[in-house]
Structure formats: structure tokens, C-alpha cells
Amino acid sequence: MSLPPFEYLAPGSTAELAGLLAAHRERCRILAGGTDLVNWMAEKIYRPDYVIDLRKLPLAAITYEKGRGLTIGAAATIESLERSPVIREFYYALVQAAGQIGSPQIRAMATIGGNCCNASPCADMPPPLITLEARVALTSARGSREVPLEEFITGNRQTAIAPDEFLECVRVPDPWPHSACRYSPFGLRAAQEIDIASVAVNVALDPATGLFAKARIAMGAVAPFAMRALKAEASLVGNAPSGETIDQAALVCSRECRPIDDLRASASYRRHIVGVLARRMLRDAVAAITS
Amino acid sequence: MKRVIELTINGSAYDVVISPQDLLIDVLRQKLDLTGTKKGCGQGDCGTCTVLIDGRRALACLTLAIACEGRQILTIEGMEKHGVLHPIQQAFIDKGAIQCGYCTPGMVLSAKALLDEHPAPTEHEIKLGISGNLCRCTGYVKIVEAVRDAAARLQAAADCGKGA
Ligand SMILES: Cc1cc2nc3c(=O)[nH]c(=O)nc-3n(C[C@H](O)[C@H](O)[C@H](O)COP(=O)(O)OP(=O)(O)OC[C@H]3O[C@@H](n4cnc5c(N)ncnc54)[C@H](O)[C@@H]3O)c2cc1C
Ligand code: FES
Ligand code: FES
């Protein structure tokens, strides 16, 4: 395997990065961990004239402040997320997702920014991030804007990023009161596996009534990009977190998803798995809140 | 455009002429004759090209050599010291954890990354630690045993060092 030729740039500041992106636009590609980009260049899917490496930029910090939520720098590695004590405490689904990605080597290299920008239907970070109402900060020489991740990913390997923008960080608001989030992918083996389906849930109970107050469910690998299960979410809110309510919501998830048949699994098997995962994750989340 | 970069590999500085698109695996093997690092799948799946960069596991087949300037690269050649194999290497030999040997350099470096962080890993931690390294020969049982044995050897050496 050899890569097509390109010029390599490693800017020392985000201002310099923004300048390079503005100058080279479609002719350049950002390099973070390289776990997707290097493969895609090898396959000649991308032939950038310039590869702009983020490695010298201070974009890898993970910070949490009550009231302002969590900020994950775009270049934070999946490994650093998996190991972050604040993420483990307040956003457990992200630890579950990070821990499932690739292999230890891939997790040490791959970044959250790359996972969101690569926008694969099977990417593990978007489903839990979407249930947590994550937003991405997109920066260019023109300024900065924030977009909900749900709107940022627009299709299979498509995002709303402009050619002169880079993803600076992912912001996740404070967890809802009395809430818990959970994520589970499902593949055919434990390591180095591409999911055949995944489900993330984030639910809050009303402490007075004990009923579901808020619910978000996102499903991965069963549509061109991570999709919300809006009907299933609506079926939960206002109801008691009983086995019956959860079973019903899980059934609605398996009807709502839009899977395809491919070499890894049939569409009907994927629907079945989505139902199973949704039921398990909802039960786990409810148990975590009530325990 | 070709250029000269300085790479620090196993503690030594190498000046090497590269193109920006050259991958670390090819630079190690073809330009520096450090052929201990193996190339398997070339796409991040098999782990046989595993090296440590600044102490963290990295896949040399997905790493641009030019992006390694200023960083510390450890390859299998850097494991032995003064002609003595590293305890992890010796444990692999003693426990029969090597058959064809193609996966071994990557396995040994994954084991090193694991043991640097978890000097006394559980069996589960060992399995997770080598989960990114495929072996077509051994069935992994002997490899897990070797890593456990290496942990004990390193621990004994550390205790001995403390006593001295
Ligand atoms: C063997 C293997 C196993 C894998 N397993 C999984 C898995 O289980 N789950 C999973 O979700 N993924 C998996 N992946 C895919 C990949 O590792 C992840 O998507 C990873 O998070 C990508 O991050 P990166 O930093 O390596 O991205 P890169 O390869 O550096 O970049 C990916 C894309 O995003 C763009 N980009 C990166 N950062 C930014 C930024 N800050 N701003 C704008 N654009 C940016 C790049 O230009 C490129 O187009 C696997 C990949 C391999 C090779
Ligand atoms: S050769 Fe690098 S992972 Fe297989
Ligand atoms: S010993 Fe042959 S691949 Fe592991």
C-alpha cells in the first residue's frame, strides 16, 4: 500500500489552521488520528493536495464544569475518553462507546473529531452523543458556529462542515437531573468488529412521580446515519418505567429503524437486534437511576 | 517533495530522506532496515505493525513517518538491551508463545504497553491488551501465559531493584 503524493502541513495554531483551510479548501484534508484518512488515501478515495495535521494544536483537552457541561477537544483520542473520570461519572454511555471501538491501538490513535467527521453509519460515538444533545463547534477564519451533532451528520459519510471549517470541539450539556445514559453496539465478535446495530439511550425520571420525564434514543448502523427513535421516545415520556413500557418502546425502535441487508446481517435480523438492545439499554438506564 | 527528517527510534536519532506520503512501516523496513516491525494487512486490522510512539501503541501502517518527527518511537529492535532480551521477549520464548513469529513483534509491544500501565494485569486485562493483535498460529493461550509470566518477571526484577 502506498499513498498518493501530497504536501504535509502541521500548523502551530488554530488561526494558522483556519488560514490554511481558507486558502486550500477542497484541496486539503485534515489529519487527526489517521485511522480513516490514511486508509481512504490508500484506496484513492481521497487524493488531497495538502494534508493538514492537527498534532501540534492544543485540541485534545477534556473539561467538565457544572452548569457548562462537557467539552471534548476534537483531537481527544478515543482512549482518553474511555479513561476520563468525569466522562465515566456523568456520561457513561460515552465510555461504553469508546471502549468498543476497534482495538487498543485504534483507540490510542483515533479521535472523537475524526469519528464525528467520518460520519460512518456504523461509527460508535454519534449515537450516544446524539442522545446527550451534543453539539459540535465548527471554526473557520470567518468565525465559529455550533451545530447539534444530529444536524451535523447529514448522510452516509456526509456532514455539514464547510470546506474552510474544522471541528474544534464537541460540547455536551450537563446531564439531565435523575438521568442515566447507556450504549451498546452489537457485532459478531468482540474486537475489531463493525457493528451490525447499536442503540444508545438517555432517559430521565421525574423524582416526584417516578415516570419517564425525558427520553432520547439513537440507533446506529441501521440507517444511513445515526437516527433518533422519535416515536419510541414519545412512547416513554409520561409513562412508568415498567417492563411493559420498555418492551413497547423497544418494539417501536425495531419498527422505526431503517436497516439494509448486507454481508454482515439481514435487515430483519438488525431490526430484531435493535429491539433487544433498546430493551436492555432502557432497563440498564432505569436501574442506574433508581439504584 | 522529498525532505530530510529526523526520527528518534529506540533512543537513536536517524536522518532519513522521505516523501510526506511515506508510511512509518515502510520507512522503518525499507529505508532504515529495521525489519523487525512486520506488515500484515496494511489497514489497521491485524496489529502486527504495532510500535510504541511516546509510550502509546500505534499502528505503523496508518502513521505518516513525517508526523513522527520529535516523537520517541520504540520498535521491537529497541526491546533488547546490551544483547539481553527483554523479559517479555524471553517469556514468549520460554512459554512457547511463538510459532511462525510474524505476530510476535507487535504482540510484544502491545504486551509492553499493557505492562507499563498494569504491572499485574488480570487475565481479562491481558486479553484486552492484546485484542488488537491477530495471531494465526498459536491460539493465544500460550501468548496470554507468556504475558502473565513476563509480568511476574518484571515484578520480581522491580522488587529486586528496590531491595538493592
Ligand atoms: C481497524 C479499524 C477498526 C475501526 N473500528 C471502529 C469502530 O469499532 N467504531 C468506530 O466508530 N470506528 C472504527 N474505526 C474507524 C475510525 O477509527 C474512527 O472513525 C476514528 O474515530 C476516526 O478518527 P481519526 O482521528 O483516526 O480520524 P482521521 O482518519 O484522522 O480523519 C477522519 C476524517 O475526518 C476528518 N477530520 C478529522 N478530524 C477533523 C476535525 N477536527 N475537523 C474536521 N475534519 C476532521 C478527516 O479529514 C477525515 O476526512 C475503525 C478503523 C479501523 C482502521
Ligand atoms: S499491518 Fe498495520 S495493522 Fe495490519
Ligand atoms: S505465531 Fe504465527 S501469527 Fe502468531
Image (cartoon, rainbow, N blue to C red):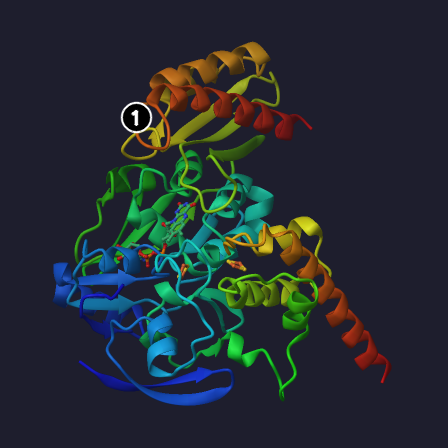
The secondary element bearing badge 1 is classed as loop
Q: Residue A112, can we see it?
A: yes
Tell me if residue B109 comes above or below residue A194 in the rendering: below
**Residue at position x 41%, y 56% in the image:** A110
Q: In which quarter of the image is ligand 2?
A: bottom left
Judged left or right of residue B45, residue A86 is right
Give the residue at x 53% y 65%: B101
* Residue A113 drawn at (x, y percent): 35, 53
**Left or right of A4, for residue A85:** right
Residue A35: quadrant of the picture: bottom left
* A134 horizontally vs A117: left or right: right
* Position above or below: A153 against A283: below
Q: Can residue A56 be seen in this view?
A: no
Q: In which quarter of the image is the C terminus of chain B?
A: bottom right
Q: Circle 1 sits on which residue?
A: A261
| Rendered location of residue A191, percent (x, y) | 50, 45
Name the one closer to the observer, B93 or A150.
B93
Which amino acid does the dot numbered 1 rest on? Answer: Asp
In depth, the one of B2 and B136 nearer the eye is B136
Q: Quadrant of the image for the N terminus of chain B?
A: bottom left
Q: In which quarter of the image is residue A59?
A: bottom left
Image coordinates of residue A42 in percent, x first then y, are: 24, 60
Residue lying at the far right of the rendered structure = B163
Residue drawn at x 52%, y 62% is B100
Label 1 is found on which chain of the structure?
A
Q: Dot 1, how many residues are within 10 Å of its Cα: few (below 14), some (14-19), or many (20+)? A: few
Residue A262: x percent and y percent? Answer: 30, 30
